[in-house]
Image (cartoon, grey):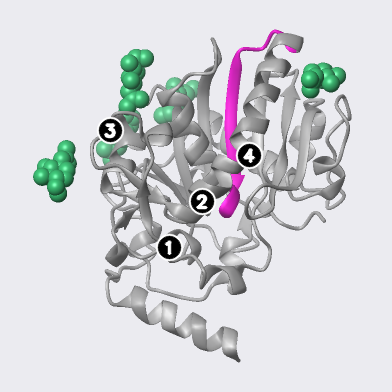
Amino acid sequence: MMMLLKLITAVAAFTATASAGLIQRGDAAADAINTTTLATLNLYEQYSAAAYCTRNTIASPGTLITCAAGNCPLVETNGATIAYSFKDIGVGDVSGFLAVDPTNSLLVLAFAGIRDIAGWITKLNDRLVPSTTVCGTTANCTVHQGFLNSWSSVSGIIVPQIINASATTGFTTLVLTGHGFGGALAALATAQFRTTPIGNIAITTLLTYGSPRVGNTAFATYLTTTNATTFNFRVTHTDDPVPKFPSRALGYLQWGPEYWIRSPTGAPVRTFDVDQINGTETSTGNSGTPFSLDFPAHFWYFNAIAACK
Ligand SMILES: *[C@@H]1O[C@H](CO)[C@@H](O)[C@H](O)[C@H]1NC(C)=O
Ligand SMILES: *[C@@H]1O[C@H](CO)[C@@H](O)[C@H](O)[C@H]1NC(C)=O
Ligand SMILES: *[C@@H]1O[C@H](CO)[C@@H](O)[C@H](O)[C@H]1NC(C)=O
Ligand SMILES: *[C@@H]1O[C@H](CO)[C@@H](O)[C@H](O)[C@H]1NC(C)=O
Ligand SMILES: *[C@@H]1O[C@H](CO)[C@@H](O)[C@H](O)[C@H]1NC(C)=O
């Protein structure tokens, strides 16, 4: 009951700033995606799903990545292995893994999200703080203090592992991904690596799924445009409530481009179900959907993303 009251308070704060819209097809401002892009979104969604499996976050280096819930078959087919796993480390119990994908000759850093989303979303409202580590020289750039504390508490552990894995494999390409809270960490990590590159490692792809907002307008613009050689996308699903927190009223803005999946929860995702919405947050995508407590939409991205235990 207490939880529900807190949630209603959070929702009320949100709806005050929401711009209502409908989930509609064929919007002139949006494009369907091609099959290559769909396959990429699908693959890294499965890496994000695999980060929920304890077996993968406690595995020793060299272990093949598998998902008991059967929700990472593409990762399994690629023969991906663990380079470094981490479970409940740092501030906010960060879990995930650094993987080696021999099929694509690259490294993948994947962060797990949080299953108890209804309890967690109410705690999301937090101060925006400056961080030159993440923002570089970008003026007025501020980020979520809690997410920053989490990322800062683990970056010193993870970065040396990326350097080690790159030296061991010879792979110099890194993809960052994660769902929910994991997506927020992946976005902060990407921003930091753009500001301070890790040796000669190229960050080619950032793909987050159902990530909450991470920073202010300057941060969103920075991640969207500055040095964005990255295949740099924020994936959302129908009216998933999580990307709408923390509120715009607190100064937050989502980065872009957004790939907005419009197919319903439980249904397969096809190329024409995904709209590409360029630039920072607009009401053309998830942000414009009427507010809901549709948590099932948060947990369906191509498959039941948090199903693996
Ligand atoms: C979004 O950007 C892509 C790539 O730059 C471009 O091909 C597409 O036409 C743009 N879509 C819209 C609606 O502007
Ligand atoms: C698919 O779309 C992506 C992103 O817009 C583009 O970079 C790529 O060249 C396209 N691939 C094909 C085969 O059309
Ligand atoms: C570096 O990577 C190798 C291969 O994954 C691993 O066996 C080794 O323990 C790693 N070294 C450190 C210092 O973590
Ligand atoms: C940064 O914030 C200050 C004070 O609000 C403002 O005057 C300035 O124009 C901002 N700079 C940029 C680049 O947004
Ligand atoms: C963008 O990249 C250039 C060249 O690598 C670098 O000097 C600059 O600091 C980067 N900007 C930001 C905001 O990270």
SS type, badge 4? helix
Image coords of residue 277 (percent x, y): 34, 45
Please, is residue 308 above or below residue 116 in the view?
Answer: above
Tell me which label, 3 or 4, sits earlier in the chain: 3
Which segment is the magenta one?
A: 169-182
Q: Tell me what residue is drawn at x 51 percent, y 42 percent.
A: 271
The residue that disc 2 covers is 147
Q: Residues within 10 Å of mark 2 (few under 14, many from 20)?
A: many
Q: Tell me what residue is drawn at x 56 percent, y 43 percent.
A: 151
Instruction: Tell me, yes or no, whether the highlighted magenta stretch contains residue 256.
Output: no
The three-letter amino acid code for the residue at tag 4 is Val
The three-letter amino acid code for the residue at tag 3 is Thr
Image coords of residue 286 (percent x, y): 40, 59
Q: CA distance from mark 1 to mark 3?
A: 21 Å
Asked if the beta carbon under badge 3 is closer than 8 A to the nearest atom of ligand 5, the reply is: yes
Callouts 1 and 4 close, C-beta under 8 Å: no
The residue that disc 4 covers is 154
Tell me which label, 2 or 3, sits earlier in the chain: 3
